[in-house]
């Protein structure tokens, strides 16, 4: 399927999976709306990908519903028909047993990974409904399929993404909009640095002793879903590195 000149909005495009997806889509000629909070990163990727395609960036926190709605309602000319939404922004905050959990971390995960995804969806869906066409891909996780110890609230947030993915597909059935999820296992990004609040040494240990997925591997899976013929919807796609068998079983040296 030729997606060149289609417009994709990617949340969390300043790093990791979102950034790799932005690069792949730019190479394939899609127009891009790149979202994130860090202005330096947004500027850098907008400049890089602007050499390949039309790019604009939006700086907002997905938790701020009004900001999300305002930014998406006032996109520059040429970007206001959003054909593809990649709901990717999200992170884990902390890895603690529930009895030691920090309620601020719980708020962050539920507000960003669940309500933030809903805020962006709320802003983008009306246009897709009007046109009876569009494609929404949620980035879930193996953590949204199987809980792991101390994953409690992060896993809950990703189980919620799984439920929203299923529910949206039901509610939007017959309206010409494809809805699906891509669920990666362990991917080496800034994810663990965020989870461990900047402790880069602890973050690095998560990916030692085996070969984790790269963000580009996930981008390829997203691209596969995007490029199926129009009558095909990849509803739920899970990918793990060879050394990962489940949320809890990873073959490390
Ligand atoms: P990164 O930390 O590398 O990227 C996270 C992205 O989300 C950044 O671009 C960040 O941008 C954005 N983001 C975070 N919080 C907010 C917020 N409040 N408002 C707007 N944007 C925000 O991690 P990944 O690339 O790994 O994570 C991307 C998605 O993939 C997440 O949903 C994660 O749960 C999921 N995932 C990750 C896996 C992994 O092992 N890495 C495996 C399975 C799923 P900025 O800071 O500029 O706002
Ligand atoms: C990210 C993968 O296993 O670190 O969703 O939770 S994991």
Image (cartoon, rainbow, N blue to C red):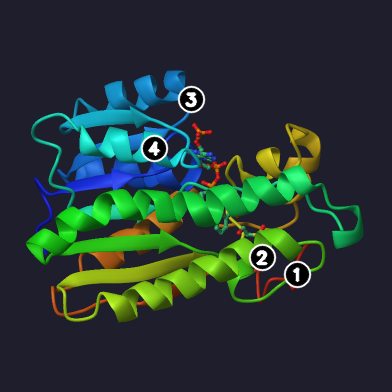
Can residue 207 be spotted in the picture?
no
Q: Is mark 1 within 8 Å of ligand 2?
A: yes
Residue 41: x, y in percent?
44, 24
Say which residue appears at 9% left-offset and 58% top-offset: 2
Distance (Cα) linking label 4 and label 2: 27 Å
Q: Is mark 2 within 8 Å of ligand 2?
A: yes
Distance (Cα) linking label 4 and label 1: 34 Å
Q: Which mark is residue 218?
A: none
Within 10 Å of the Cα at label 3, are there few (<14), some (14-19), or many (20+) other Cα atoms?
A: some
Report the residue that reaches farthest toward the front: 66
Q: Given this view, does label 1 or label 2 mark the residue nearer the observer?
A: 2
Count of number-bearing discs? 4
Q: Which mark is residue 38?
A: 3
Label 4 close to label 1 by CB (< 8 Å): no
Within 10 Å of the Cα at label 1, are there few (<14), some (14-19), or many (20+) other Cα atoms?
A: some
Q: Which mark is residue 66?
A: 4
Q: Say which element carries label 2.
A: helix
Where on the picture, by quarter, is residue 253?
bottom right
Residue 5: x, y in percent?
9, 45
Residue 174: x, y in percent?
17, 81
Q: Is mark 3 within 8 Å of ligand 1?
A: yes
Say which residue appears at 40% left-offset and 50% top-offset: 119
Residue 185: x, y in percent?
58, 64
The residue beneath circle 1 is 148
Within 10 Å of the Cα at label 4, are there few (<14), some (14-19), or many (20+) other Cα atoms?
A: few
Distance (Cα) linking label 4 and label 3: 19 Å
Q: Ligand 2 is in which quadrant of the figure? A: bottom right
Within 10 Å of the Cα at label 2, are there few (<14), some (14-19), or many (20+) other Cα atoms?
A: many
């Amino acid at each position: 399927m030729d997606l060149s000149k289609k417009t994709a909005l990617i949340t969390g495009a300043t790093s990791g999976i979102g950034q790799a997806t932005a690069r792949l889509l730019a190479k394939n000629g899609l127009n891009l709306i790149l979202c994130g909070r860090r202005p330096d990163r947004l500027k850098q990727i907008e400049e890089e990908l602007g050499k390949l395609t039309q790019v604009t960036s939006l700086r907002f926190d997905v938790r701020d519903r009004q900001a999300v709605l305002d930014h998406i309602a006032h996109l520059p000319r040429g970007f206001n028909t959003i054909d593809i939404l990649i709901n990717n922004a999200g992170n884990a905050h902390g890895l603690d047993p529930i009895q030691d959990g920090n309620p601020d971390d719980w708020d962050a995960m539920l507000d960003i990974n669940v309500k933030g995804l809903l805020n962006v969806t709320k802003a983008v869906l009306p246009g897709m409904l009007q046109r009876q066409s569009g494609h929404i891909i949620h980035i879930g996780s193996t953590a949204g399929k199987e809980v792991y110890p101390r994953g409690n609230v992060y896993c809950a947030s990703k189980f919620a993404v799984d439920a929203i993915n299923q529910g949206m597909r039901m509610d939007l059935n017959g309206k010409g909009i494809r809805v699906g999820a891509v669920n990666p296992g362990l991917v080496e990004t800034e994810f663990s640095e965020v989870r461990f609040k900047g402790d880069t040494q602890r973050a690095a240990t998560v990916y030692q002793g085996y070969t984790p997925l790269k963000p580009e591997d996930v981008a390829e899976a997203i691209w596969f879903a995007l490029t199926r013929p129009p009558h095909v919807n990849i509803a739920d796609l899970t990918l793990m590195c060879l050394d990962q068998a489940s949320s809890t079983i990873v073959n490390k040296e």
